[in-house]
Image (cartoon, rainbow, N blue to C red):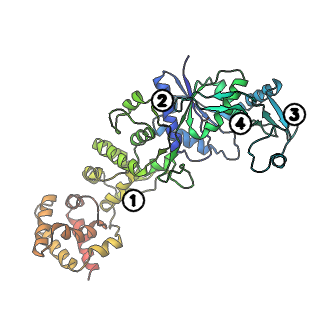
Amino acid sequence: MTVRVRFAPSPTGMFHVGGARSALQNWIFAKQQGGVFVLRIEDTDAARNKPEWTEGILSALDWIGIARGSYEGPYFQSSYAGEHRAAAQRLYEGGRAYYCDCTREDVQARTGPQQRGYDGFCRDRGLEPGEGRALRFRTPDEGETVVVDLVRGEPTFENKLIEDFVIARGDGSPVFLLANVVDDMSMGITHVIRAEEHLPNTPKQQLLWDALGVKPPIWAHVPVVVNEKRQKLSKRRDKVALEAYRDEGYLADAMRNYLMLLGWAPSGDREIVPWSVIEEEFRLDEVNPSPAFFDEKKLRAFNGDYIRALPVEEFVAACRPWLTGTETIAPPPWQPDEFDPAAFAAVAPLAQTRIAVLSEIVPNVDFLFLADPLIDEAAWAKAMKEGAADLLDAAIVAFEALESWDAESLKATLEAVGAERGLKLGKAQAPVRVAVTGRTVGLPLFESLEVLGRDRTLTRLRAARVRLV
Ligand code: GLU
């Protein structure tokens, strides 16, 4: 039997990192089993779906390595409405479902507000189909439903505790529970790997598989992803969109490796391993079923490690979207013709060891491409204290006299200027750095000055000196 898995997102918003995690797990599982990965867009909620969200899913999957054309689909659930209705009809005709005209108020009036779920009032009323009548599944009164779950063992549900749930609404439209099962069935899905949030649906869905006469799939409910307060990651509260991480400058390799560490780890106490190792070692039955903490700080550090590991030419290429701007990444503060690729290449290795996300490249190098540095006023106030004017005067004179404009000579010169004033190099650097780059922190100063060049450096030092008068 060929293994067939599917990733079945609903295109109702930005693509969630938890979704990306499930997609990757499906992807790897299919690959390991020599199986097929199917992408199904569950777009039946017409009010909430937008085509751009679907495009966002496809491009986000592409970004993390699940490339268009390398999987089956995308299929669109809305195209199978006929099959969903036919399945509902079959269940009705087979006596496995019945029509119900109770309103929520009716049910509550009978059961009291505390009681949850449907009380089975219409079970044996023999109502015909009709406008406003929902179709409910006749849940078995006895027995239990045992779900075979690769992550959770065999969660077992007593059938008598499962209400007669709705499978088609009063307007005849099948609900998610049923559509999802019918599609999995017709697409020959053998393993359903999805988030834990769906586990409460699973016994109901498995009953539908049974009632429709098809062997249910093997399930794997992977842990819910939570924030530092152990709350489920929510798009209203947390940064959850994969695209937001991409546009901030997380590397796809770092991101997908990190996502796979949510609830699982490769052998040997390692976290950063080649993707091929993850593809080889990942096992669903090793996934920890408890909630998985999405630790953005750790991800940042992780990303920094990946950035540092890039060959420098790849780092330069990876920075490009932030140096030019794209459809989704804001343009840098300089004009395109102000950018100097040679100057960038000269400082790139220095920046590579200092940034954790690629977007941080911009504030580190903008001083090279802007006619005037962007002065951070707080940095200015901090650096331009008493003695700064005198120090700048002396630095200007000493730099003007330099024969060779290189980092080493610049450093020796400023060191001497500082020493004459009883200042350590760090203190002597501060006003120079702010005058030239606008900031108190950044790339190593003397290499920066070397690349910026004599004329521009001196012009900026003089301009700062004028401001101090
Ligand atoms: N469309 C569902 C969702 O996005 C997926 C259901 C499933 O994976 O079975 O949550």
Left or right relative to 142: residue 244 = left
In the picture, the quarter occupied by the C terminus is: bottom left
First reached walking from the N terminus: tag 1 or tag 4: 4
- Local SS, label 4: helix
Residue under circle 2? 285
Residue 378 falls in image quadrant: bottom left
Q: Amino acid at mark 4?
A: Leu
The front one of 210 and 157 is 157
Tell whether circle 2 marks a residue whose Cβ is less than 8 angstroms from ligand 1. Answer: no
Looking at marks 3 and 2 on the same chain, the residue that comes earlier in the sequence is marked by 3
Q: Please report the residue visible at 58 percent of the width from the left and 24 percent of the height from the top.
A: 190
Alpha carbon separation for disc pair 3 and 1: 67 Å
Q: Residues within 10 Å of mark 2 (few under 14, many from 20)?
A: some
Q: Are marks 3 and 1 in contact (CB under 8 Å)?
A: no
Query: Residue 290, which numbered label?
Result: none
Instruction: Locate residue 404: give its quadrant.
Output: bottom left
Nearer the observer: mark 3 or 2; the answer is: 2
Cβ atoms at labels 4 and 2 below 8 Å apart: no
Which residue is label 1 attached to?
Answer: 335
C-alpha separation, residue under disc 4 versus residue under disc 2: 28 Å
Q: Is mark 3 within 8 Å of ligand 1?
A: no
Nearest to viewer (mark 3 / mark 4) = 4
Residue type at numbered disc 2: Asp
Residue placed most toward the observer, 275 or 191: 191
Picture layout, residue 468 above or below residue 346: below
- Whichever of labels 3 and 4 marks the residue nearer the N terminus, that label is 3
First in residue order: circle 1 vs circle 2: 2
Residue identified by numbered label 4: 161
Inspect the image, locate mark 1, and give the three-letter code of the amino acid beneath it: Gln
Left or right: residue 85 compared with residue 254: right
